[in-house]
Image: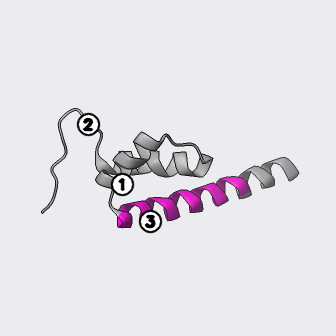
Amino acid sequence: MKQRPVPGRPSRWWATVKAVLWSFLGLRRRQDFQEDIQQLTPLHVLIVGLVLGFLFVILLMVLVRWVVG
C-alpha cells in the first residue's frame, strides 16, 4: 500500500534529499531520524545518496582545477 503525500508536506524526494544532506554533515536530531525511517524509501535514499556523492566529487574536481589553474 502506497502512502499519499500529505498536503503541506514536502515531497518524498525533497525530504530524502534533506535527509541525505544532513547525513553527509553527520547532524540529525533523533526525532527527525525516526520520522525519516517511517517516511523514506531505502531505494530513494540510495539513489539520492549516490547522485549527491557523485555531484560532490565533481564539485571538488572543478574546485581543485580552478584553484590550481
**Mark 2–mark 1 distance (CA, rounded to whole Å):** 16 Å
Marks 2 and 1 close (CB-CB < 8 Å) = no
- Neighbor class of circle 3 (other Cα within 10 Å; few <14, some 14-19, many 20+) is few
In front: label 2 or label 1: 1
Q: Name the amino acid type tagged 3.
A: Leu
Which residue corresponds to mark 1? 37
- Between 6 and 63, the one nearer to me in the picture: 6
| Viewer-closest of 26 and 53 | 26
Answer with mark 1 or mark 3, whichever residue precedes in sequence.
1
Q: Earlier in the sequence, mark 2 or mark 1?
A: 2
Q: Could you say whether the residue bearing mark 1 is in a helix, strand or loop?
A: helix
Residue 63: image x %, image y %?
Answer: 75, 50
Residue shown at 42% from the left, 60% from the top:
45
Residue 55, position in %: x, y? 58, 57
Residue 9 is marked as: 2
- The circle on residue 46 is 3
Looking at the rendered structure, the secondary structure element under dot 2 is loop
In three-dimensional space, the C-alpha distance between marks 2 and 3, rounded to whole angstroms, equals 22 Å
Q: Residues within 10 Å of mark 2 (few under 14, many from 20)?
A: few
- Callout 2 amino acid: Arg
- Residue range of the region highlighted in magenta in the rendering: 42-60
**Quadrant of the image occupied by residue 40:** bottom left
Q: Residue at x 19, y 45 (%)?
A: 5
Give SS at disc 3.
helix
Which residue does the image show at 51% across and 65% down from the upper left?
50
The N terminus lies in which quarter of the figure?
Answer: bottom left
